[in-house]
Amino acid sequence: MNRILGTLLLLAASATVAAQAWAGPKTELDQGILAIQHQWAHINYAMPEDQRAQAFHKLEGQADALIARYPGHVEPRVWKAITLSSHAAVAGPFSALKLAEQARDLLLEAEKKDPSALDGSIFTSLATLYSQVPGWPIGFGNNDKARAYFAKAIAANPDGIDPNYFYAQFLYGQHEYKLALEHVQKALAAPARPERPLADKGRRQEADALLAKVRADMGDSGYDSQVMR
């Protein structure tokens, strides 16, 4: 159960799953989503860990209000799922799996309605949940499902920082170091999201740390660990 807390923290620190910045004028829905994104990044990267659970719970209520206001749109559901996953990372062990299951169910619902929403971040989020939550009999984790969703995520957003980072993380866990290196490098080369500087900064720091781990283990495995990004 402790693995849920540690691995979901990686999902939270990512988001999994993050939407690309919108171009042009913002609708009220866009503004609402952007407000949730900014608050999520502040909680996740700037707030002390012992204050995050309460803050994420409050942000879930904000997402619920947006869901109620825009019932035909999947974006608020995706961001509630991201917030639930982040909350799971700082919740107690008995709450973590329940929060992760709620996040998964929201994402599966969103996938049925509009799988292309938010540049495929639904796929990234589901892939990460399936790869990091423990499998049966404890949880619903499933590496085969994770790999299939990562393939969809990369197809939908091949140059995005989040799908490439989380796929690289998954591949590293599977000891597929050469492919992990390729995707973590793509994550670090991803275009900036001007409206999400804090999230980008945090993700790039995580990708740099993963790059160092991949290179070190590639060296241990006889690969050339000095490949430049």
Image (spheres, rainbow, N blue to C red):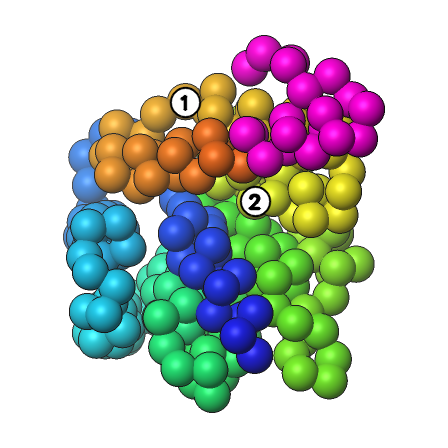
- Which of the image's four quarters has the C terminus? top right
Q: Residue furthest front?
A: 220
- Magenta region includes residue 228: yes
Instruction: Tell me if residue 142 comes above or below residue 203 in the rendering.
Output: below
**Residue beneath disc 2:** 166
Tally of numbered tags = 2
Q: Note whether residue 9 is visible.
A: yes
Q: Residue 206: name its quadrant.
A: top left
Query: For the residue marked with disc 2, what is the amino acid?
Result: Phe
Q: Secondary structure at mark 2?
A: helix
Q: Position of residue 126 (x, y in %)?
A: 58, 60
4 lies left or right of 215:
left
What residue is rendered at 41% in x and 22% in y?
Answer: 191
Q: Which residues are the magenta region?
A: 211-229
Q: Name which residue lies at 28% across and 55% down.
A: 44
N-term-proximal mark, 1 vs 2: 2
222 drawn magenta: yes
Residue 191 disc label: 1
Q: Quadrant of the N terminus?
A: bottom right
